[in-house]
Amino acid sequence: MKLKSLKIGKWEIQHPIFQGGMGVGISWDRLAGSVSATGAMGIISSVGTGYYENKRFSTLRLDRPKNVDSFYSKDALFEIFKNARKLCGDSPIGANVLYAINDYGRVVRDACEAGANAIITGAGLPTNMPEFTKDFPDVALIPIVSSAKALKIICKRWSKRYNKLPDAVIVEGPLSGGHQGFSYDACFEEKNKLENIVPEVKKEAENWGDMPLIAAGGIWDKKDIEKFISLGASGVQMGTRFIATHECDASDKFKKTLLNAKEDDIKLIKSPVGYPARAIKTKLMDMIADKTAPKVKCISNCVAPCQRGVEATKVGYCIADRLGDAFMGEDDGLFFSGSNGYKANEIVHVKDLVKELTD
């Protein structure tokens, strides 16, 4: 199957592949810029930008970005986009902004001002996303959903309040890395498999003008891409596969942890965000289990559902600090991975990976 280019809003994407937005510090300027340079869609994560360039853009406390403004540093986000543009020029590049974060609206505006051509939002239903992008009409708005019902809610709300519909929708199944859009038990239910929810969301999308649908969660190779395009998707989003690239902004420790992972090492764990998250089993999980993980201090105040460390204390770890440790290559970091991450066996260049996925 020859893959077709993808039109989203006013932007033409040569290869219908989104590189998933991964924080802290996994998909920043080097990865996203390199992906967009190939004709695919690079996506910069807005999470934890206060760690960028050894945290020189941050106000620090205990060597970590202090509070919301510092953890989601506007200055660092601008620098990341500027450096990504040196790699990809005018090619479309997006920003991933989680809905569950504190100061969501401000970060969306920051990303638009920094030069994002698209805003991608998951971790909740972004029913008010257009409110923060009305001064940026050329920016494509792309929510992430896990059901047809979620897309219907978003479309009804956007249409009524803003006379706006999504420019595309990402449908994420329960095999993705990081946070899931399902409860723990629901992640294992047959009805929630990506191949079962894509046709349902596609049918709902047709009720709203048939926007492009991007399938995500557990997609690994061209065979997977062809499978989901045959089910009605216009393209796919892949995150974990891009970690095993030379250009990925992740630490060498993160990449080595992924390469060494076995299938049984990739687990669903509890998260302070309130949803299960998929990560590689390391000593951190043992420390959480026996209550010896680093004490929760809530320095960064990263996500609203955590209630300033209340939920982090319940699950036994601070997600901002542990993702920050993974970025910095610390042993007690939290290393997110999709369910197929164990298949990674070598580090390749982005251009070669995109060529493999599209040829």
Image: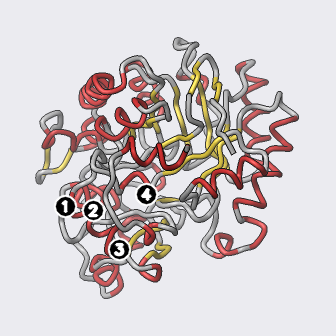
Measure how far apart labels 2 and 1 are at the Cα level. 6 Å
- Give the quadrant of residue 130: top right
Q: What element carries label 4?
A: helix
Mark 2 and mark 1 in contact? Answer it, CB < 8 Å: yes
Residue type marked 2: Phe
Q: Is mark 1 on a helix, strand or loop?
A: loop
Q: In this view, does 132 lie to the left or right of 150?
A: left
Mark 1 and mark 3 in contact? Answer it, CB < 8 Å: no
- Quadrant for the C terminus, please: top right
Residue on which disc 1 sits: 329
Q: Which of marks 2 and 3 is in front?
A: 2
Mark 4 and mark 1 in contact? Answer it, CB < 8 Å: no
Whether residue 301 is visible, yes or no, is no
Residue on which disc 3 sits: 316
Q: Nearer the viewer, mark 4 or mark 1?
A: 1
Residue type marked 4: Cys
* Residue at the image point whose x is 35% and y is 35% from the top: 34
Q: Residue 254 carries which label?
A: 2
Mark 4 and mark 3 in contact? Answer it, CB < 8 Å: no
Mark 2 and mark 3 in contact? Answer it, CB < 8 Å: no
Measure how far apart labels 1 and 3 are at the Cα level. 21 Å
Give neighbour class at mark 3: few <14, some 14-19, many 20+ (Cα, 10 Å): many
* Residue at the image point whose x is 39% and y is 41% from the top: 351
Residue on which disc 4 sits: 306
Residue type marked 1: Gly
Label 2 or label 3, whichever comes before in sequence order: 2
Q: Position of residue 79 (x, y in %)?
A: 24, 26
Give neighbour class at mark 4: few <14, some 14-19, many 20+ (Cα, 10 Å): many
